[in-house]
Image: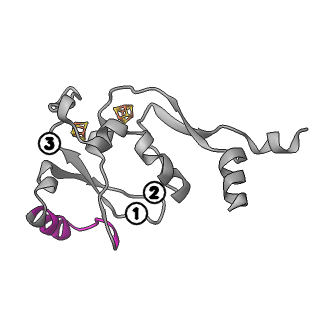
Amino acid sequence: MILDIYNKLFSSKYIRKGKCKKCGACCRNILFSTEEGYVKSEELFKQMQKKYKYYRNFKISGVIKDKQDFQNGALTFECKHITKDNKCRIYYLRPLFCRKYPDAIQELIYQGVTMLDECGYYFDVDKKFKSYLEK
Ligand code: SF4
Ligand code: SF4
């Protein structure tokens, strides 16, 4: 318990840096997962769309190759609300996750999730390892 509090207060954390380039890549490269992991088959996604209306807002945009093992083969999805010039058609009504992006994935960084290469944001540790060695 005390160790947890100590770690929360004094260990390094990832903080968001950079800024949005308005490239729209985050709306075109969305990953979905189930209890079994990332969605990797069209068949499974169709089942999800049948069961939950929410998924009908997305279409398959590609597949991840040559990434970390756990993401390899995962399908990427494009939101139907993104315009050709990278604007959100439902900006004022967009879901909470979109409002919180990219901060929403901050916790996932610890699980090995990385930002999109195109993204102008990145996460960096606020306290470098070297600083722990200095007095
Ligand atoms: S709702 Fe808007 S912000 Fe969210 S993924 Fe779709 S286009 Fe992007
Ligand atoms: S991928 Fe990053 S830079 Fe591009 S629109 Fe999304 S948040 Fe902005």
Instruction: State yes or no: Cβ of the residue under disc 3 lies below 8 Å from any atom of ligand 1.
Output: yes
Q: Nearer the viewer, residue 68 or 103?
A: 103
Residue linked to disc 3: 80
Residue picked out by circle 2: 67
Residue at the extreme bottom of the image, as rendered = 36
Graded by Cα atoms within 10 Å as few (under 14), some (14 to 19) or many (20 or more), the crowding at tag 3 reads: some
From the top left corner, tell me how far across and down residue 33 is, in percent. Answer: 31, 63
In the image, which disc is placed on residue 107? none
Residue 40 highlighted magenta (yes or no): yes
**Amino acid type, residue under disc 1 in the picture:** Asn
User: Residue lying furthest right in this view?
Assistant: 135
Spot occupied by residue 66 in the image (x, y as percentages of width and height): 44, 58
Task: Report ligand 1 position as a quadrant.
Answer: top left
Instruction: Say which amino acid is labelled 3.
Output: Lys
Examine the structure image and report whether residue 39 is included in the region drawn in magenta. yes
Marks 2 and 1, how far apart at CA = 6 Å
On the picture, is 15 further left or further right than 31?
Answer: right
x and y percentages locating residue 45 in the rendered image: 18, 64
